[in-house]
Image (spheres, rainbow, N blue to C red):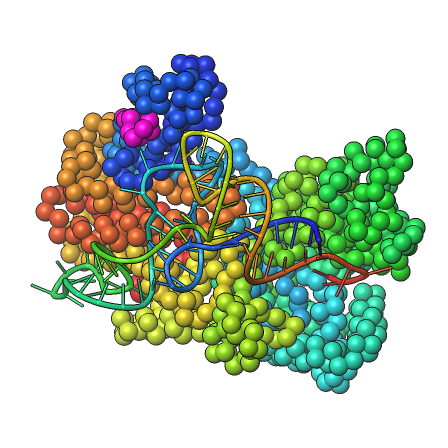
Amino acid sequence: MYLTLLKRLRETLAGHIREKYGVELSVVLERPPKLEMGEAASPVCFELAKRLKKAPRQIAQEIANSLPKIAGIARVEVAGAGYLNVFFDRAWFWERTRKEAGEALAGLAASARKKVIVEHTSINPNKAAHIGHLRNAVLGDTMVRLLRHTGNDVAVQNYIDNTGVQVADVVIAFEEMEKKSLAEVKALAAGKNFDYLCWDLYAKATQFFEEDKVRAGRLRGETLKVIEAGGGETAEMATVIADAVVGFHLRTMARLDISYELLARESEILHLHFWDAAFEKLKASGAIQLATSGKNAGCWVMPWGNEVKDLKEVNEVNEKSGLSEASNPDDEDQSKIIVRSNGTVTYVGKDIAYQLWKFGLLGKDFHYRRWPNPPDGKELWATTAGPNEAGTPHFGGAEAVYNVIDARQAYLQEVVAEGLRALGHTKEAENSIHFDYEIVALTPRCAAEMGYELSAEDAKRPYVEVSGRKGFGVKADDLITRMLAAAAARVLQKHAEMAGTELKQTANALAVGALRFFLLKVTRNTIIAFDFEDALSAEGETGPYCQYAIVRIRGIRRKGQDRGVEEASGLEMKLSADLQTPEENASLKKIMEGPESNTIWEVLLASGSLDYAVDAAIGAQEPAFVSKYAFQLAQAFNNFYHKHHILSEADEEKRAFLLGLTELVERQLVLALGLLGIEAPEKM
RNA sequence: GCGCCCGUAGCUCAGCUGGAUAGAGCAUCGGACUUCUAAUCCGAGGGUCGCAGGUUCAAAUCCUGCCGGGCGCGCCA
């Protein structure tokens, strides 16, 4: 509701200024520093003062006096050196927010509906997931929830690099180091801790490769070739390993309520010749060129550099004036290799093909099969080179694509977008969103706690980077398990009687809440220095704090029912029965504008600001805005809870109102946490 | 060498396209449970917003330079 009022205010103000002064400008609105200054404010008169050469305060006064009445806004005042302070009609806000909470979203959907692909998780399927992968998945999943909430048609895809070096390394480790047969690996892959086993094995393999670089190069080359070609025992072993590890990843993510629609595998990009199709397009358009001399001789390269933002333009220049240095394919500093001189395609090349497919621009499609036994029971599809299974949905062909990939890959993601742009797909290049985020590292203390030995240099740093290659890091499942145990212990302290399913579900909600909130409360470009103490915390700005507010509200409801007090909704009806025009309702006015009404208004205003938080979060692609919002709403409620004892309120009308308000807080907070993938328990 | 990101309270972080006295959480200290759950609330202390210039009526925010830290720039992915 806050967003609705802001929009209305902005439009009215802009229109009024246009009419009155003949000036066109965008109206800046902000939140005043104190509640007494109103709910919204605009410094627009300072800007106007410059243009009209008049005192800002005078202009502000003129506008305040002549601005037409806006529904939901009680009054506009002049403050400070020329601010316009805007005061909402509180009773109106109350009525409308309650209605909106129930109905608003369906209406929003139709106009905004867009087909969107979000790719996230995309862990190399050769080892267990670690804390850094969790940040990726939680960010991606939360963005998916936000986009769906605002009416978009979102498909979640998880890219599986099942034919890459990392899988090959584990295959080599099994074959060369462990001397395991395919049958033996199959047996291991069916076991309980196969992803952990691979984690250790991969770390050992890394050492093995470092011992003898020549041997490493030979083994990798041979194995990769066999895996990419398919067929034979080694290729099958790779498939067995990758598929099994993907299964573990899916189960790990399911513990955090994260699921997917499609597993897009690199093997199909190869076998269905996605690259060939992309290669033809890139060659035909001149987006990539064959280098004939220099360091990159024999490679197909994409010109790259500051001057080639618009390749077309450069090509035109070339025609007129011969070669510019920027697009000379032999100039190695300005070029990105897409096809090696031996004819094989690089990772970026495959990624361009995949990105083209996501937008429906490749002219090819995958084949699809159902993924057997998805952990959450939801339908899950995977790409296949075999025949299509009946009931295959349509994947791909999106208007916007979010690739959730860490910030270190920014350059490569730029190359991919540049590839689209060079093919003339400017709009799609702009809608290729590298949803980047900073890494999760460990605090030196945490690393020490886990038994890792640090160099003196590392020990002094604020954080130490995790490394799957070295087997250094906090495994996702270990962390979740530890958080579950901590949550269960905490619940039992307060509810010794709790057991069985109830205890399990409660602990689960709290552990997931703590973990997801921990990963979501900081903005994307903040490096998280992971520490168990911070992650396990349940006080202050945490998931459990937000959940606790809801638990309190539910406690009130239970108590109210036990006592035989009428249901909140019933009482509310009584209060609202004669509310044809809430603005004029004397009872409401008394409650909301009387003395000591500030805490009430703070909670109500926060409750009605979810739309604003969600809008800002999507606009800035920053899920942290929603976690910040949830925390602030919970905080406002906890404050209110201490000042107003609801069930013992003597004034019947006021009690009904307070009950209605808590119900509204619950609805909004449950919604906000739901967008973060966090559920609230009944008790905790 | 080139490019990107970061530097805000003891610690971890917010601070939206420039706007009112720079805010949270943790930690510290002092208060509040016979009440709807104290996983809570109230209060206190704590900041030359890395440094120096510039633009502006107005700069933590924009521009330039410097200092300190991180990352990226491969015929790896």
- Pick the residue in front: A283 or A268: A283
State the image coordinates of residue A479 (x, y, percent, origin top left). 48, 71
User: Residue A365: in sight, yes or no?
Assistant: no
Instruction: Give the residues in magenta.
Output: A75-85
- Pick the residue in front: A436 or A526: A526
User: Residue A654: in sight, yes or no?
Assistant: yes
Q: Quadrant of residue A44?
A: top left
Q: Is residue A46 above or below residue A18?
A: below
State the image coordinates of residue B28 (x, y, percent, origin top left). 27, 68
Who's the residue at 68% across and 41% down the image?
A: A429
Who's the residue at 34% across and 40% down the image?
A: A608
Who's the residue at 18% across and 33% down the image?
A: A589
Who's the residue at 69% across and 69% down the image?
A: A242
> Is A485 placed left or right of A331 in the picture?
left
- Pick the residue in front: A220 or A389: A220
State the image coordinates of residue A203 (x, y, percent, origin top left). 66, 77
